[in-house]
Amino acid sequence: MASHIKIFDTTLRDGEQSPGCSMNLQEKLQVAKQLERLKVDVIEAGFAIASPGDFAAVQAVAQAVKNCRVASLARALPEDIDRAYEAVKYAEAPRIHTFIATSDIHMKYKLKASKEEVLERAVSMVKYAKKYCSDIEFSAEDASRSEVAFLYEIFEAVIKAGATVINIPDTVGYTTPDEFYNLILNIKNNVPNIDLAEISVHCHNDLGLAVANTVAAAKAGATQLECTINGIGERAGNAALEEIVMALNTRKDVYGFTTGIETTEIYPASRLVSKLTGMRIQHNKAIVGDNAFAHESGIHQHGVLAHKSTYEIMTPESVGLTKNKLILGKHSGRHAFEERLKSLGYHLSKEELNKTFQEFKNLADKKKVVYDKDLEALVEEKSVNTKE
Ligand code: KIV
Ligand code: ZN
């Protein structure tokens, strides 16, 4: 039986940290409601101490969302944890997500703290958060560049202190799928009380490997995957929710996991986040890009018209699109051309079709895409109109 993977969405926290992506309270509520329709397991609603606006947004999301856990981020500091709880306490299932950096680089230059101090702060802040709420996530920031023995030590200690989720972030998108797979496996095998906590991963996309690293970690035993809609996030972004979910769905034979995601809500979620953040989606973006289900070449169009599975590994309907798009351009073939004319209501004789197809090819050489209105003009203009 396929095992269940939880999806932790951080569009409203890490996604919003992306330059130019900030959203106001009403916009955040709209995204949260769409995430609920998408059926994510956890919504990270923000970083409550970051600003009064962030606090209000986390609080509003916690009050509005009924069917997902709601988390707020907090540094490993009492004032952050107080503020996080104050904001999430109205949620049906609140979570405090606290973090501290564990890599030598971060401890030396950012925290100016020793390993012992970091360990002590992590443990005492998990205990502190535990006073408020039973569900505590602990993240070892920059875990993928941290000394692995220190990770074992800190994870064992925070689980003892009450952490229910331990998160292993690839904060700067530095790891690779093989390396990350081994790291997760080693953590599973070397942290003695690991079975008392959920293993989570959180990958950034600086080398374009965020989704690959995330699914590799799932294969190694991570059961909570952190991600954002359209992969928005700091620098090159976070692992994209839609890509992780559809990779796991489409390749169940390889991964053997199910998620609770309502995949038909993926496309509406993607459009909403793009509209509200102003962050445009590249045309060839997997799953949600304009070209993800578009076919232009004649060979591909012919194949798809004969049977979709020739060039589509998932259906557009499964991600919330109504149908695939056959783009008419210079690479298109007669078959797609004739089908499109029929769908526009034109039934041409063989001779008329040959003539109009030739004219279409001449036009397509001059234009990137031939739209329906161009086809109509071609047919009407040549008085070969046999529209029914
Ligand atoms: O990238 C990161 O390390 C984070 C943590 C706060 C989880 O966003
Ligand atoms: Zn992050």
Image (cartoon, grey):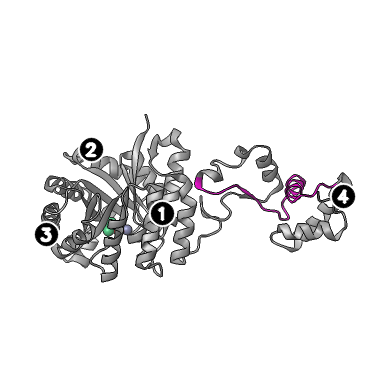
Sequence order check, earlier mark of 3 and 2:
3
Q: CA distance from mark 2 to mark 4?
A: 71 Å
**Disc number lying in front (3 or 4):** 4
Q: CA distance from mark 3 to mark 1?
A: 41 Å
Q: Dot 3 corresponds to which residue?
A: 117
Query: Within the image, what quadrant is residue 238 found in?
Result: bottom left
Q: Dot 4 corresponds to which residue?
A: 352
Answer with left or right where residue 156 lies relative to residue 275: left
Residue 298 seen by the camera: yes
Q: CA distance from mark 3 to mark 2?
A: 26 Å
Q: Dot 1 corresponds to which residue?
A: 34
Given residues 150 and 47, the one toward you in this image is: 47
Q: CA distance from mark 2 to mark 1?
A: 37 Å
Q: Amino acid at mark 1?
A: Gln
**Magenta extent:** 319-348
Which percent across, then down, holds residue 354? 85, 49
